Amino acid sequence: MIKDEKILFSGMQATGNLTLGNYLGALKNWLALAGEYTCFYCVVDLHSITVRQDPAELRKRARNLFALYVAAGLDPEENCIYYQSHVSGHAELAWILNCFTYMGELNRMTQFKDKSAKHADNINAGLFTYPVLMAADILLYQTDVVPVGIDQMQHLELTRDIAQRFNAIYGDVFTIPEAYLGKSGAKIMSLQNPEKKMSKSDENPNASIFLLDDKDTILRKFKRAVTDSEAVIAYRDEQPGIKNLLDIYCACTGKMPEEAVAEFSGKGYGELKSAVGETVADLLAPLQKRHVELLTEKDYIDRMIKENAQKADSYALKTLRKVQKKVGFPERVR
Ligand code: TRP
């Protein structure tokens, strides 16, 4: 397939294990878009240290995330999958953009407010300027489209504002990126509290399906999923647990909610839960199989990590050098 010249950029943090929510809400969109754009998929490890991490654990998780991108079907020879920390341009551009971002703007970021409430003992400057680093990620590659979850929209809006502000002063330096929100309905909720998003950092392991959960675990977690006492399978806000199960089923099968409701009409919650569990286990099976294979392909992964870091770096440098020149840094003498 001949790819468009257009650039797609997205990233995920390597904290926690990826969940079914990450897969259905993000990775699946990435797979669908991979053929159309020149894609950069970043393991955003610089962002991860805005909260305390165990170094060995972070390194392990970052590698695991890299392998999961590949296992999910993103070909690392076709798509630039790389670690943010391997391309120093991210941090360099972030510094420059910090000088074009207002305290007031960052103060309004809801993720900052949430995270500082959660990590009250460590409200560091990195947590505050997190969105500027994210803007640097995106703008460094002259990105046209950014697939993001709704919770990242505010950061994307800020990215656009920073880019426009910079361009207004220095001319057309940055491409103004657009968000790609994907299909609605792919927001997967916690199995233990269907009012809350399924999260990699949920303390209750039964709340989330992790991509590497084995079949028995998946079936057991669905069996324990919180529902209600209505005893009727309907797709409505008043039954958030059942609605979530139907949403998951539909996201996996491509069916419409009405179809799913018809299929399960007259059946019990137990049957619905085991059908959804089986569907999810089947969906994840090929990814899990590939992930196991990849564990034995260490040299291949290492080579991809290296080659893609170089590729990303050469793209990033083009923008970075241009920006450095625009703001007035002296030319480099080689
Ligand atoms: N902040 C994003 C999140 O938590 C991750 C991220 C970092 C990102 N840089 C990005 C997403 C650039 C898209 C584009 O989900």
Image (tube, rainbow, N blue to C red):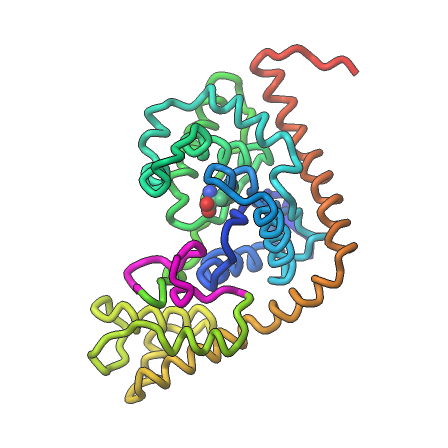
Q: Quadrant of residue 152?
A: top left
Q: Quadrant of residue 328?
A: top right
Outermost residue toward the bottom?
A: 266
Q: Quadrant of residue 174?
A: top right
**Residue 41, how many percent across, how many down?**
59, 47
Q: Is residue 185 left or right of residue 229?
A: right
For the C terminus, give its image quadrant.
Answer: top right
For the N terminus, give its image quadrant.
Answer: bottom right
In the image, what residue occupies the spot 62% across and 16% down? 325
**273 lies above or below 293:** below
In the image, what residue occupies the spot 51% across and 49% down? 15
Magenta residues, as a range? 193-211
266 or 22: nearer the eye?
22
In the image, what residue occupies the spot 30% across and 72% down? 226
**Residue 171, how many percent across, how many down?**
53, 20
Check if residue 243 falls in the magenta segment.
Answer: no
Check if residue 204 falls in the magenta segment.
Answer: yes
**5 lies above or below 126:** below
Q: Is residue 191 left or right of residue 65?
A: left
